[in-house]
């Protein structure tokens, strides 16, 4: 066992995933989902958008797994992907964001913000239920009208408005279809994890 394998025992799961062991992807998702969700929710407060960003972070991580450097922490690498995904999203949305480190200016001075650490041991609290191949298979199995919107939203990273324009559908219909597609995917992927 190498020094890095002793320091980071989760590397065995990553190696299995790189060798196309589908159960390893499920294990990675199970192990890290809560931590990734916590990172995302600290940056994006809308629950629906956060769900999108968590899914996108895992898809990006799985697609880039071959580039992971085993000398470093997998959790740190994964959280960086999730954080960068949020930063890109926030830039696109041009939302006002606040730094955790900088004091907040108020009319009677500045206040330093304090945040409780909601992840005392991140690596022990992470759970998720999908693998990149299983996600693709689940998406492929969706009825066409749901598959189109979910692919545009998650793989092509199009906004709801862009999807509405491309498919010539009302914005509400696009949102409803994406919501329904997510429900169907979650149901399918929960079965995969618990089978």
Image: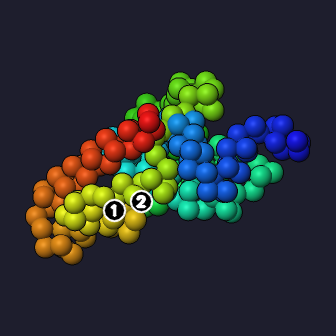
Circle 2 sits on which residue?
136
In the picture as drawn, the residue positioned furthest to the left comes out as: 170
Q: What element does badge 1 sit on?
A: helix
Residue shown at 73%/44% (left/top)? 12
In front here: 142 or 168? 142
For residue 174, side relative to residue 81 (left or right): left
Residue 58: x and y in percent read 51, 51
Residue shown at 18%/68% (left/top)? 164
Residue shown at 44%/36% (left/top)? 195
- Please tell me how crowded label 2 is: few (under 14), some (14-19), or many (20+) other residues with Cα within 10 Å: some
CB of mark 1 within 8 Å of CB of mark 2?
A: yes
Quadrant the N terminus occupies: top right
Q: Relative to 120, say whether 166 is above or below.
A: below
Circle 1 sits on which residue?
140
Marker disc for residue 71:
none
Say if residue 89 shows up in the picture: no
Among the 4 quarters of the image, the one containing residue 178:
bottom left
């Amino acid at each position: 066992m190498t020094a890095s394998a002793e320091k980071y025992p989760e590397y065995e799961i990553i190696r299995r995933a790189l060798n196309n062991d589908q159960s390893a992807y499920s294990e990675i998702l199970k192990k890290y989902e809560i931590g990734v969700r916590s990172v995302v929710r600290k940056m994006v407060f809308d629950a629906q958008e956060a769900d999108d960003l968590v899914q996108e972070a895992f898809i990006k991580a799985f697609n880039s797994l071959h580039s992971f450097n085993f000398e470093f922490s997998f959790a740190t690498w994964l959280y960086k992907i999730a954080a960068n995904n949020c930063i890109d999203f926030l830039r696109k949305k041009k939302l006002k964001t606040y730094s955790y480190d900088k004091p907040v200016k108020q009319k009677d001075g500045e206040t330093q913000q304090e945040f409780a650490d909601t992840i005392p041991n991140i690596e022990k609290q992470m759970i998720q239920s999908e693998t990149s191949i299983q996600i693709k298979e689940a998406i492929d199995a969706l009825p066409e009208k749901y598959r189109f919107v979910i692919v545009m939203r998650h793989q092509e990273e199009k906004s709801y408005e862009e999807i509405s324009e491309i498919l010539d559908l009302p914005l509400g219909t696009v949102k409803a279809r994406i919501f329904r597609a997510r429900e169907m995917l979650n149901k399918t992927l929960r079965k995969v994890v618990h089978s």
